[in-house]
Image (cartoon, grey):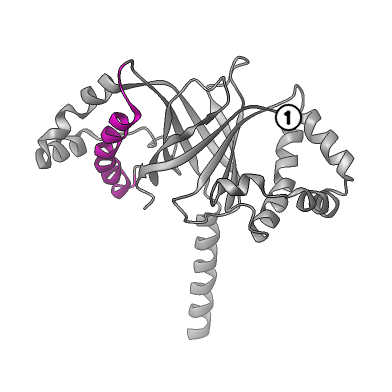
Amino acid sequence: MKKIILLFIAIFAFTATSFAQTKTTYINIAYHKLKPGHTIEEAMANEKRWKIVHQKRQSLGVITGWGAYTILNQYKSESVDYDYVSLNTSNDLNTITLYPEEMGAALIKEDPSLATLLDDTKKVSSVIRNKITKSIEFTGSSHDLNSVILVEAIQPTPGNLYTYIDYAKKVKSIQLDRIKAGNIQEWGLWQHLAPLSTDGVGQFTAVTFLKDLSKLDFDSSQIYINGAKKYMNLTPEQFTKKISEIREIKQSVLMKYEVGTFN
């Protein structure tokens, strides 16, 4: 009987762990624009105050994390119309934008300066759009908060949405090889759920974490050549042709983690 009980416990633990690992991570991305006459330093001073609020939300299980990311040295595509982004992560779309009233009242009681936080933020910056997103591929976190983050907005070409998703799942293996080679630290692909429109910059966001700017010049061509053959049975020419046919990179920006609850 004891062995049966222990076996049951082991099976339950394995099942619970497997379930936890398969939970979908959702990301609510806010794109922020500075108002005339204000600086990114002012905006980040406000975001550091917001950290207190998001830490409380995280402790209540409303979100799993929050962070604000600034553009590194203005390295961005010409069409990038925002100055920084913030994001909330959660396993539940119904709570990801939730700010419980009781929580807010309790925080203001502890720190009365938080009563003006919303108005102070509106004076400095505004949210020009939000996107509800989910992570569909992820290599695992490097836990390095000093990374340079390459953020790319990607749009599948007409009729190739599912072809691109299938392709991305195979490319993940190549990204893992890049990690092993010391080229990148982590990689992920996010799919936007709402809003969806034909005038947007892309239905997907790819995030690639690099130790520093020097890694942008890392020669990873052989990694891609080997990976294309190993994981897709494609020649370099076939690999290059396929990726150019099924998706476009609409925007590119280099960012850095400024403040958040991930540390």
In the displayed structure, would residue 113 be above or below residue 142? above
In the displayed structure, would residue 207 be above or below residue 36? below
Q: Is residue 187 left or right of residue 37?
A: right
Q: Residue furthest bottom?
A: 2
Q: Residues within 10 Å of mark 1 (few under 14, many from 20)?
A: some
Residue located at (29% from left, 42% from top): 57
Instruction: Determine which residue is flagged by label 1.
Output: 247
Residue located at (55% from left, 47% from top): 209
Residue located at (81% from left, 29% from top): 245
Q: Nearer the viewer, residue 244 or 256?
A: 256
**Residue 107, quarter of picture:** top left
Whether residue 44 is in magenta: the answer is yes
In the displayed structure, would residue 196 be above or below residue 215? above
Q: Nearer the viewer, residue 185 or 114?
A: 185
Tell me if residue 1 can be seen.
Answer: no
The rendered magenta stretch, by its main secondary structure, is classed as helix
Position of residue 33 measured from the top left corner of the image (x, y, whole percent): 40, 21
Position of residue 35 measured from the top left corner of the image (x, y, whole percent): 33, 17
Q: Nearer the viewer, residue 242 or 107?
A: 242
Position of residue 216 measured from the top left corner of the image (x, y, whole percent): 62, 44
Residue located at (53% from left, 42% from top): 149
Q: Nearer the viewer, residue 75 or 51?
A: 75
In the rendered structure, which segment of residues is drawn in magenta?
37-61
Whether residue 46 is in magenta: the answer is yes
Type of the residue with mark 1: Arg
Picture mark count: 1
Q: Helix, strand, or loop for circle 1?
A: strand
In the displayed structure, would residue 175 be above or below residue 135? below
Position of residue 132 measured from the top left corner of the image (x, y, whole percent): 49, 30
Tell me if residue 170 can be seen.
Answer: yes
**Residue 196, quarter of picture:** top right
